[in-house]
Amino acid sequence: MRLERRPRSSEPASKQKLRLWLFLLHASRAIELELRARLREEFATTLPKFDVMAALARKGAGITMTELSRLLMVSNGNVTGIIDRLAAEGMVVRLAHQGDRRATFVRLTRKGTQHFAAMAKAHEAWIAELLAGLGREDTDTLVGLLGTLRAPANGRSQSS
């Protein structure tokens, strides 16, 4: 599949941007639904657990619960529930945070690290399969274009 630039329509730019948002939302939801199903079927886990384990894997030495909730952009309560379930499964361990007794430090266990590695490998293959219709050049283009959308999320606005 090759991305082609279509001639600009006679619609106002705001309408075309709304259409773009709807396409992005639909694509994101469709991919997310498929990933949720595959994680459930193949690993008996959930996408939120996968996301928490991915964040912990990136921070190999561990991270505080507060940092984890901030990184994942979810409430401390949500993170606590997921960590409780992962701890019960032996995937994560809670440690006292040295220097701050109020903070809890969390990291993957050896079992959690091994389990996440298997899930991450499958996840990468699933994404490659789901996005197989995009060639390398189109993928690079989309990554570059969509990367510009981070500015509004960081408090900067862009003009139409």
Image (cartoon, rainbow, N blue to C red):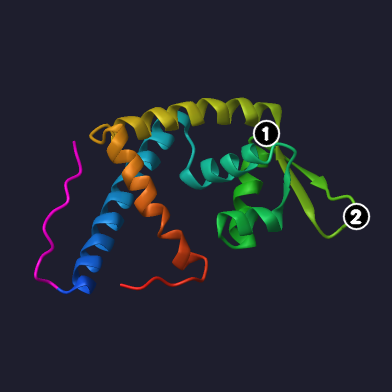
The image position of residue 70, as x and y in percent, is 62, 59
Looking at the figure, which quarter contains the N terminus?
top left
> What's the distance in space between the residues labelled 1 and 2, CA to CA?
26 Å
Tell me if residue 18 comes above or below residue 86 in the rendering.
below
Q: Which residue: 70% across, 54% down? A: 65
| Residue 33 at least partly seen | no
* Nearest the eye: 71 or 158: 158
First of labels 1, 2 by sequence position: 1
The image position of residue 59, as x and y in percent, is 68, 41
Left of 55 or right of it: where is 118?
A: left
Q: Which residue: 39% across, 70% down? A: 158
In the image, is residue 87 part of the stretch drawn in magenta? no
* Magenta range: 1-11
Residue 99 is labelled as 2
Q: Mark 1 — residue?
A: 90
The image position of residue 51, as x and y in percent, is 53, 45
Instruction: Count the marks.
Output: 2
The image quarter in which residue 133 lies: top left
* Nearest the eye: 149 or 69: 149
Left of 113 or right of it: where is 61?
A: right
Left of 101 or right of it: where is 89?
A: left
Give the secondary structure at mark 1: loop
Q: Amino acid at mark 2?
A: Gly
| Residue 120 at least partly seen | yes
The image position of residue 15, as x and y in percent, is 19, 71
Tell me if residue 24 comes above or below residue 152 in the rendering.
above
